[in-house]
Image (cartoon, rainbow, N blue to C red):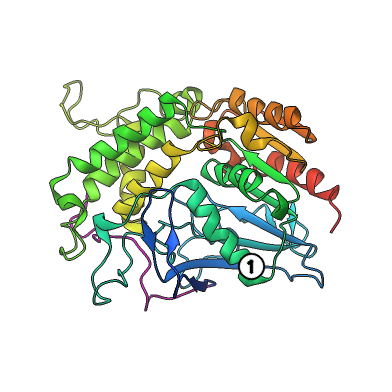
């Protein structure tokens, strides 16, 4: 890995804002978290598309996945080095039609692209010291509570729909359970009602790889020089995750057993790379340049803690009485969040008395298909949203 990788890829005040807007709350009264910790002066970065109608009935919340951010749609520009992560789905005349809907996407609490997270300055100190490892553990439910504050700020009493894939789907489900009067439909995609043991195991391996990087410095690395941050640990964590995002067939068809360096001829070198290794190294370094390592840890833990039934006796009790329509979308080749988990979501809503549909995307691309199969995904979302009254 190049030795000039920044110690953090977090957005910082003074950096180009791009399309970001900012909402800050908890000035006078602390924001309580599920862990028992509290935060003050919490900032949520968000972006919007379209116009809110007169009765605020056309608002849709789009929730991002693990390493996503608020830039769900739009071109690359200053402040946004890449186009929106769902740009093919959100926009005028697209599946989530911004001619019809007012669309909002916020960077989650604990994130690193404008919202309060570990790379942010702790307001309880002198205003210059970062939270770092002192940033508390947050849950998906905490993220949703922060989004609820944002909704009130925007004048949205109830979302027409909350939509998200992977961790974004977890947020959609928490909206249904926590704020059922404030959401009129949900589309959870490639996600689960509660993290499974295997999903937790994958998360632990990634966090452990970061903890073993001596440059992580127990989370206090922000004052290090470029090239001396925990990029290696974060890169390995991302490589582990990247394997779970795609299917075996895609890896085999794309890379096979091809070796990148044939300079040795038929001789084998211990670190001679297969093409798939080069691919993983590329994605590991790419993330290290645009994300914050401590945020990666915090969000990973939030996903492992995800359980709609936590503190509510059971999933059944958590969803008792929900009435909003639910479109649960699975991916046929998803090894990280297998399709049976999305079928369970549809069944749980049906058991609660809500109209629910399960739809499966046929794709070889694995978990990442919800980002890649935009035609199938867009068609399903468009059909569901067309039935909503706004």
Residue shown at the point (63%, 67%) measured from the top left: 152
Q: Position of residue 243 (x, y in %)?
A: 40, 31
Question: Which image quarter: residue 278?
Answer: top left
Q: Residue furthest left?
A: 214
Q: Position of residue 127 (x, y in %)?
A: 28, 76
- Left or right of 213, for residue 372: right
Question: Which image quarter: residue 149?
Answer: bottom right
Residue shown at the point (68%, 29%) measured from the top left: 348
In front of the other: 2 or 377: 377
Give the residue pinned by disc 1. Answer: 152
The quadrant of the rendering that contains the C terminus is bottom right
- Left or right of 67, for residue 158: right
Residue shown at the point (41%, 71%) measured from the top left: 41
In front of the other: 309 or 382: 309
Q: Does 19 sit above or below residue 201?
A: below
In front of the other: 63 or 30: 30
How many marks do you count on the picture? Answer: 1
Q: Which residues are magenta?
A: 1-18
* Residue 79 visible in rendering: yes
In front of the other: 205 or 44: 44
Residue shown at the point (43%, 38%) measured from the top left: 305
* Residue 83 visible in rendering: no
Give the crowd class for mark 1: few <14, some 14-19, many >=20 residues within 10 Å: few
Q: Does 308 sit above or below residue 266?
A: below
Q: Position of residue 346 (x, y in %)?
A: 70, 30
Q: Position of residue 151 (x, y in %)?
A: 63, 64
Dominant secondary structure (helix, strand or loop) of the stretch shown in magenta:
loop
């Amino acid at each position: 890995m190049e030795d000039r990788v920044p110690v953090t890829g977090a957005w910082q005040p003074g950096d180009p804002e791009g399309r970001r807007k900012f909402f800050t709350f908890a000035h006078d009264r602390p924001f309580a978290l599920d862990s028992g910790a509290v935060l003050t002066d919490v900032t949520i970065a968000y972006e919007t598309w379209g116009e809110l109608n007169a009765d605020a009935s056309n608002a849709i919340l789009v929730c991002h996945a693990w390493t996503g951010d608020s830039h769900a749609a739009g071109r690359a520009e200053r402040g946004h080095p890449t186009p929106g992560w769902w740009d093919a789905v959100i926009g005028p005349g697209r599946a989530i039609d911004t001619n019809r809907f007012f669309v909002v996407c916020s960077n989650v609490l604990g994130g690193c692209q404008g919202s309060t997270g570990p790379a942010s300055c702790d307001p309880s100190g002198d205003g210059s010291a970062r939270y770092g490892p002192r940033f508390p553990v947050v849950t998906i439910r905490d993220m949703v509570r922060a989004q609820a504050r944002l909704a009130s700020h925007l004048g949205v009493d109830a979302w027409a729909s909350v939509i998200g894939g992977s961790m974004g789907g977890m947020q959609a489900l928490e909206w249904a359970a926590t704020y059922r009067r404030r959401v009129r439909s949900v589309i959870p995609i490639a996600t689960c009602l509660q993290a499974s043991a295997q999903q937790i195991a994958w998360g632990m391996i990634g966090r452990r790889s970061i903890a073993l990087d001596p440059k992580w410095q127990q989370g206090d690395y922000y004052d290090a020089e470029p090239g001396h941050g925990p990029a290696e640990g974060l890169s390995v964590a991302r490589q582990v995750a990247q394997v779970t995002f795609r299917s075996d067939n895609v890896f085999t068809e794309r890379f096979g057993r091809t070796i990148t360096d044939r300079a040795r001829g038929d001789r084998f070198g211990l670190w001679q790379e297969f093409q798939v290794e080069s691919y993983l190294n590329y994605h590991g370094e790419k993330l290290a340049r645009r994300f914050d390592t401590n945020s990666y840890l915090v969000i990973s833990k939030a996903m492992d803690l995800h359980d709609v039934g936590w503190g509510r006796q059971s999933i059944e009790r958590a969803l008792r009485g929900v009435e909003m329509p639910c479109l649960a979308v699975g991916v046929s080749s998803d090894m990280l969040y297998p399709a049976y988990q999305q079928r369970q979501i549809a069944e749980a809503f049906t058991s609660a008395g809500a109209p629910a549909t399960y739809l499966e995307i046929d794709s070889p691309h694995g978990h990442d298909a919800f980002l890649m199969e935009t035609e199938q995904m867009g068609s399903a979302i468009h059909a569901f949203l067309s039935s909503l009254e706004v």
